[in-house]
Amino acid sequence: MPRVGVIGGGQLARMMVPEALELGIEIRVLAEAEGAPASIAATAVGDYRDVDAVLSFAADVDVVTFDHEHVPQHVLRALEDSGTVVRPGPDALLYAQDKILMRRRLQELGLPVPEWTTASSPEDLERFLADHGGSAVVKTPRGGYDGKGVRVVRAAADVADWFAALDEDGNGGELLVEELVAFRRELAQLVARRPSGQIEAWPVVETIQRDGVCAEVLAPAPASAGRVADVAAQIAVDVAEGLGVTGVLAVELFETDDDRLLVNELAMRPHNSGHWTQNGSTTSQFEQHVRAVLDLPLGATGTVAPWSVMVNVLGGPTDGSALVDHYPAMLDRHPTAKMHAYGKSPRPGRKLGHVNVAGEELDQVVYEARAAAAFFTTP
């Protein structure tokens, strides 16, 4: 039985478990703490920044992959030096860990990105603002997610605390500064790539963000057939091949007001924008990721219905009850909805799970998914 080691015990690792078991593949998880979402498969608890802990965990698995991209480069290199197969490898993950390096490499590959620069001082940022209509997006190069580490600014004072942190660090750090893109919607393109080169793409999807967090996904993206779908898929294939990604890759895109597609962010793992594939595609992103990192032939990525919608459950019931308390009513009212819970305790804004619905008519599918998810966010 092949053994896949997953570093990180979050919901993405949790959702790999049943898919792997159906294939007869053993999943082992290095969780950050007891009671993590993937604790059902946790064989070790330890710090992913601790070389010894990670090497000990990886000693008897066939391949190591990830629930997140935050494992430091020196730990990744130590894994490879020990003879462990790491997928995606450190040379690829480098670009998911550092947004400045990612922007630079994508530009070298000729891929479409927003206009950008780096800023190590308020004066650098003010110059960019002056050249771009007085507005910009500033990002911390590392560690941001779900809207964290991202600010829309109109003056350097809007990120004075970030510049102060750079000065205190004393290592000559920089912030990423980008144009404030005029876009009509956000899209995401998922592909999976095997080490031997096979690549499969799912349909491009539309993602709906609220407060910097993905709230809903429509699959496929409405009015995307033809040019939009073809360009999005080609961009993701070019990223996967150009960066040497193995496993699932998510490329988040802006569809601009003037009909361009620009790369916004990358994730080298299963991604929130691909959760719909659990019930809406022939092969889910979680099964595909396991196949890809083991260099097994990839599954078909067609849809099982014309439309699929994913709605995140954020925060949890406001009356303090558990998600499970609301199952009977939700399942009775929405028998086509599929609930996926992450085993997390409620907290404002926290992703506790998601609801998938697939069907023939987009309006009806959207209604069913939203209505089902609402059972878990109202008293």
Image (tube, rainbow, N blue to C red):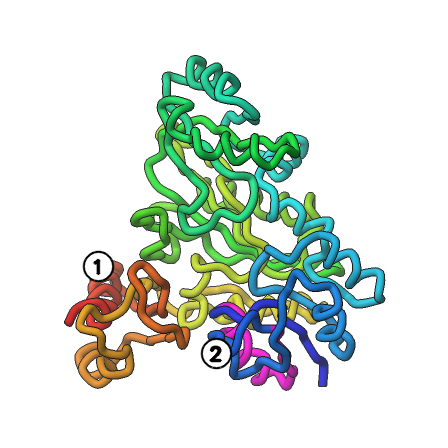
Q: Residue at x 46, y 36 (%)?
A: 261
The amino acid at mark 2 is Gly
Name the secondary structure under disc 2: loop
Residue 13 colored magenta? yes
Q: Nearer the viewer, mark 1 or mark 2?
A: 2
Q: In which quarter of the image is the C terminus?
A: bottom left
Q: Which residue sits at x=42%, y=23%?
A: 156
Give the residue number, with chain letter if any, for mark 1: 363
> In the image, residue 59 lies at what x, y percent?
78, 76
The answer to whether residue 189 is above or below residue 113 is below
Q: Do the residues labelled 1 and 2 touch (CB within 8 Å)?
A: no
Nearest to the observer: residue 91 or residue 239: 91
Q: Residue 35 carries which label?
A: 2
- Return the mark for residue 233: none
Q: Can residue 252 be seen in this view?
A: yes
251 in relation to 218, above or below: above
Q: Which residue is drawn at 36% across and 34% down?
A: 183
